[in-house]
């Protein structure tokens, strides 16, 4: 049985539809440089896609598997784990608008524990489900306020503590970002000392 393995550079022509060919569309070929086993991408290699994106990392039988980095034409990147060609496991996303996510991903969707930083520098650390804030977490807003408690579908939902920019705490239940029912309000305690200063 003939086995082909080693380091190669392989060019893959991109298939165009008839309409694309008739329109004279030209697309550069996709290129793979890296290790090959039995004619398949296997080991470590880099792949340039026709859409301008680039992947560098580990492969298993022609699929992205293990650790790798994917870069998109707009500057967005993903560094992390892959499984059977899909983003799956722990990694870091960075988007072109400056936002980022570091944490767990399930089949390409943010699910599990993670940290999200928005383009406005809001920071959320906590649970995610199906790409949304869902479960327990802490959201620190860019204006200095923060919420610690439960979230559902990206909204404050359930028991939590909201602290405003003046340090006033609102403790109670929330439904779809709105306070609901009775609340406990705690204000910061100011301590003032009266005394006399005498210079020696």
Image (cartoon, rainbow, N blue to C red):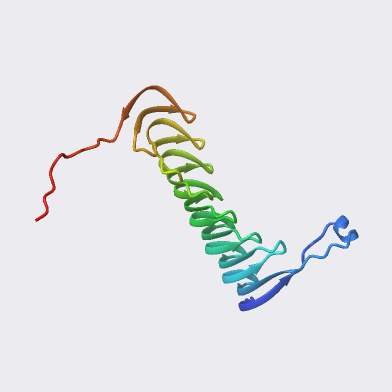
Q: Position of residue 51 (x, y in %)?
A: 71, 61
Work out whether residue 173 or residue 68 is closer to the camera in this orientation and state it: 173
Q: Position of residue 165 (x, y in %)?
A: 39, 39
**Left or right placement of residue 51 versus residue 193 in this view:** right
Q: Position of residue 199 (x, y in %)?
A: 12, 54
Q: How many marks?
A: 0
Q: Residue at x 84, y 57 (%)?
A: 17
Where 173 falls versus 26 (above or below)?
A: above
Where 31 falls versus 198 (above or below)?
A: below
Q: Residue at x 34, y 38 (%)?
A: 167
Q: Residue at x 45, y 43 (%)?
A: 143
Where 7 falls versus 67 (above or below)?
A: below
**Left or right placement of residue 49 versus residue 108 in this view:** right
For the N terminus, give its image quadrant. bottom right
Work out whether residue 78 or residue 164 is closer to the camera in this orientation and state it: 164
Residue at the outermost left position: 200
The part of the image, by quadrant, that contains residue 26 is bottom right
Q: Position of residue 162 (x, y in %)?
A: 38, 35
Q: Residue at x 28, y 35 (%)?
A: 188
**Left or right placement of residue 177 versus residue 31 in this view:** left
For the C terminus, give its image quadrant. bottom left
Residue at the outermost top position: 181
């Amino acid at each position: 049985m003939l086995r082909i393995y080693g380091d190669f550079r392989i060019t893959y022509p991109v298939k165009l539809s008839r309409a694309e060919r008739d329109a004279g569309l030209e697309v550069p070929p996709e290129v793979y440089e890296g290790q090959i086993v039995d004619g398949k991408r296997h080991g470590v290699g880099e792949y340039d896609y026709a859409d301008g994106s680039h992947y560098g990392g580990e492969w298993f039988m022609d699929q992205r598997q293990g650790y790798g980095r994917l870069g998109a034409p707009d500057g967005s990147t993903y560094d992390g784990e892959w499984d059977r060609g899909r983003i799956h496991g722990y990694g870091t996303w960075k988007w072109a608008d400056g936002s980022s996510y570091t944490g767990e991903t399930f089949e390409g969707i943010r699910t599990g524990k993670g940290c999200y930083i928005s383009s406005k520098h809001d920071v959320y650390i906590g649970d995610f489900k199906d790409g949304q804030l869902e479960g327990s977490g802490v959201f620190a807003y860019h204006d200095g306020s923060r919420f610690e408690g439960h979230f559902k579908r990206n909204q404050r939902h359930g028991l939590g503590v909201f602290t405003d920019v003046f340090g006033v705490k609102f403790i109670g239940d929330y439904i779809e970002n709105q306070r609901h029912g009775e609340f406990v309000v705690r204000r910061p305690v100011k301590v003032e000392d009266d005394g006399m200063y005498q210079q020696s």
